[in-house]
Amino acid sequence: MKLAGLKSVDAAHEESIWAAAWAPATDHRPTALLLTGALDETVRVWRPDDLASVGTPARGHALGVVSLAAHPAGALAAAVSLDSYIRVFDVDSGASVATLEAPPSEVWGVQFHPKGNALAAAGGGSGSVKLWDTEKWQPITSLAVPRPEGARPDKTGSGKFVLSVAWSPDGKLLACGSMDGTIAVYDAVRMKFLHHLEGHHMPVRSMVFSPVDPHVLFTASDDCHIHIYDAKEKSLIGAMSGHASWVLSIDVSPDGMAVASGSSDRTVRLWDINTRASVQTMSNHSDQVWAVAFRPPGGTGVRAGRLASVSDDKSISLYDYS
């Protein structure tokens, strides 16, 4: 497995780029599109091979866009801003579909259910994961994140500051990562807390489940490590180390064989899941890498894998994954 640089766009946004996501191909659009969100309060859309800009930047976000998620059907996406609002929009037209408010705290990570029927958001200082239905965009519930037994309260006073969220590919598990390094796992069918996963000791800013094993969870932390958990059995099954600073973002390849990570050490790394070793380091960026995202499978004429990365240096890099 390897990455090969294909294209980079400098000054892709006017400010630091903190979010990236791929909107899958649709019946009306034969290719996936790359979405990027930045502190310039815009979301931009890019073609998948030449990174040509599509349409005009979507505005209406305040305080910067920090997270993006695309609906699995490809037509809609959600953008999270630090103003406590989640804005759902049409990927192709940029038109607003819904605006979701998540007081009393800013929202961080956001992720759609694999079937597309719910949206989960990491609720920051509210110490919770908030859920909405995607038909009428009404709140479903708010899942409190309990403090582990014997844990010291973190700096928020509420006990938890929730940064990241992920659904298992079968939709049965929901996990969230917190500022104190703990990970909470829920039964997503019964909306019930199951247990904590421990091992990290600093913020868990990004997490993703394996597309081929619904119990395997990959997590990225400021402690410079990537952990591999069996989220159902509550066990740490592996760890991968190599970044010289915070691991800010993580994604897993559609074939389930590789993990990509972005770090404040300014690099993107590719990891072999079987050997749990770093197989390649890409140094395209001149500042910290806030998001990495593999292109989802599907679409007309799609033969090769793609990975995108975005950075505080305001650039986007696109890589071939093979």
Image: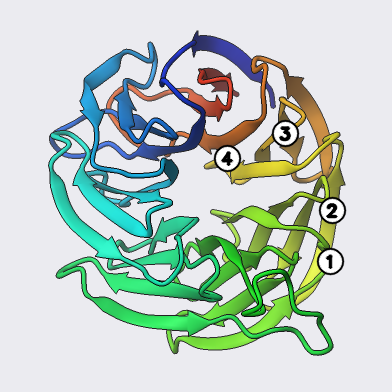
- Up-down relation of residue 30 to residue 178 (above or below): above
Residue 199: which numbered mark, if any? 1
Q: Which of 245 and 184 is in front in this view?
A: 245
**Image spot of residue 5 (x, y percent):** 59, 12
Mark 4–mark 3 contact, CB under 8 Å? no
First in sequence, mark 1 or 2: give its number. 1
Classify mark 4: helix, strand or loop: loop
Q: State the CA–CA distance, disc 1 to disc 3.
A: 21 Å
**Image spot of residue 243 (x, y percent):** 82, 35
First in sequence, mark 4 or 3: give its number. 4
Mark 1–mark 2 contact, CB under 8 Å? yes
- Up-down relation of residue 221 to residue 56 (above or below): below
Q: State the CA–CA distance, disc 2 to disc 3.
A: 19 Å
Q: State the CA–CA distance, disc 4 to disc 2.
A: 17 Å
Residue 41: which numbered mark, if any? none
Amino acid type of the residue tagged 4 in the rendering: Ser
Foreground disc of the pair 4, 2: 2
**Image spot of residue 280 (x, y percent):** 77, 24
User: Residue at the spot x=60%, y=24% of the render?
Assistant: 322
Label 3 belongs to which residue?
264
Foreground disc of the pair 4, 3: 3
Label 4 belongs to which residue?
253
Amino acid type of the residue tagged 2 in the rendering: Ala
First in sequence, mark 4 or 2: give its number. 2
